[in-house]
Image: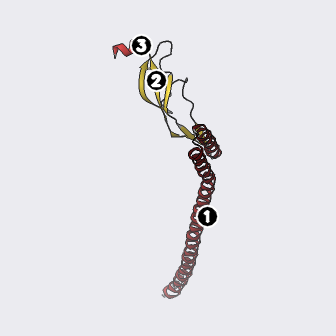
Amino acid sequence: MEEKAVGPSIPPLAEELEKLLHEESEKTEAYRSQMTYLQADFDNYKKRVEKTLAESKQSGSDQIIMSLLSIIDELELALSAAKNKGELATLLQGVDMTLKKLQGILGKEGLTRIESVGKKFDPNIHEVVAKEPVEGKEEGMIIDEIRSGYLLRGKLLRPSMVRVAVAPTAAKEA
């Protein structure tokens, strides 16, 4: 009795598998090529964004510098007037006006001065330089500001350096 083959013979199965493998290899190569192009596009996009950010930063710096040039002009005028006329009042007035203009320019950029004197000490925005016994002042109150502190757009840029009141009895014990 003769046995009949069940299912396809081996050579047609191998050909079919080879065909499927070739199709999948082509798909893989197409995906790889697509991924390479996408990576190149992303790298180009990243470079464009970095260039745009650098240009924006430079433009912002240019605008601030242009604003500050007028302050240099005013300081030079105040000094020149004070030298020529020998008037200290003219110099003081010119410097005062220039300081206010500079504070205005920096204020537009988001800079705010931390008001300290008469306020309670806050370690988040103040740095104690000295503690002094003071009658009639609550302990921890700021009695003097040595150096102004600033916030830039709500973030601490530089803490205020301050002198803080302590109770006279606490000072004697220390």
Give the SS element for disc 1.
helix
Q: Which mark is residue 164?
A: 2
The kind of residue on which mark 1 rests is: Thr
Query: Picture coordinates of residue 55 (x, y %)?
Result: 60, 63
User: Would you place residue 100 above or below residue 45 in this image?
Assistant: above
User: Would you place residue 60 above or below residue 169 in this image?
Assistant: below
| Few, some or many residues within 10 Å of mark 1 (<14, 14–19, 20+) | few
For the residues labelled 2 and 3, the Cα–Cα distance comes to 12 Å
On the question of residue 48 being in view, the answer is: yes
For the residues labelled 3 and 1, the Cα–Cα distance comes to 59 Å
Residue at 54% of width from left, 26% of height from top?
Answer: 117
Q: Which residue is mark 1?
A: 52
Residue in the foreground of this view, choosing between 99 and 39: 99
Q: Quick one: which residue is furthest to the front in this view? A: 85
Give the SS element for disc 3.
helix
The kind of residue on which mark 3 rests is: Pro
Contact (Cβ within 8 Å) of mark 2 with mark 3: no
User: Would you place residue 77 above or below residue 56 in this image?
Assistant: above
The kind of residue on which mark 2 rests is: Val
Residue in the foreground of this view, choosing between 100 and 20: 100
- Please report whichever mark, 1 or 2, sits nearer to the chain's N-terminal start: 1
